[in-house]
Structure formats: C-alpha cells, structure tokens
Amino acid sequence: MATEKKRIKVAVTDETLEKLDWLLQEDKKKATGKRVYACDVLERLIAQEYKIRKVFR
C-alpha cells in the first residue's frame, strides 16, 4: 500500500551524511524510550533555521 505523504529526493555529500548521522546518534542518546528518525532531526533543523530567518528578516 502506497503512502500519501510527499517524498522528496535530496542529493547530499558524504560529509553531510556523516554529520546527519552524528546528529541522529546524539539525539538517540538523549531520547529515552522513543525512536528517533533522521526525518525528525531534519525537521528540527529546518524549523530552527526558519524561525531564525523569520526573526531577523
């Protein structure tokens, strides 16, 4: 059964993937009892960047 969510393709460098993996591992250390996915990390980073840019606009 196909999902209704929009899926995007993003090309990133190996260095960026390593950094994302590190951030994911750090979040997993802090989260107790719940799973942390890469999309959670990306959503948090995008939300923070969006908030910062809106404030200093």
Image (cartoon, grey):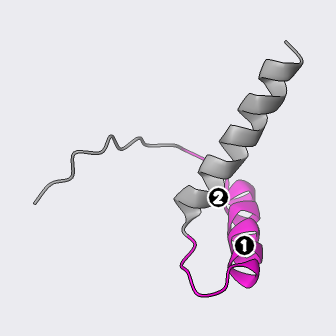
Residue 17: which quarter of the image?
bottom right
Q: Measured from the top left, where is residue 45 in percent x and y?
A: 71, 47
* Residue position for label 1: 27
Mark 2 neighbour density, 10 Å: few (under 14) some (14–19) many (20 or more)? some
Residue 53 lies, with reference to residue 7, above or below; the image says above
Locate residue 20 relative to residue 8 in the image: left or right. Answer: right
Residue 6 lies, with reference to residue 15, above or below; the image says above
Q: Residue furthest front?
A: 33
Q: CA distance from mark 1 to mark 2?
A: 8 Å
Question: What's the amino acid at mark 1?
Answer: Asp
Question: Is 32 a magenta residue?
Answer: yes
Query: What residue range appears in magenta?
Result: 11-36
The answer to the question of whether label 1 and label 2 lie on touching residues, with beta carbons closer than 8 A, is: yes
**Mark before the other along the chain sequence, 1 or 2:** 1
Disc 2 element: helix
Residue at the image position 68 percent from the left and 79 percent from the top: 31
Locate residue 19 relative to residue 5 in the image: left or right. Answer: right
Looking at the rendering, in which quadrant would you find the N terminus? bottom left
Question: What's the amino acid at mark 2?
Answer: Val
* Image mark for residue 41: 2
Residue at the image position 68 percent from the left and 40 percent from the top: 47
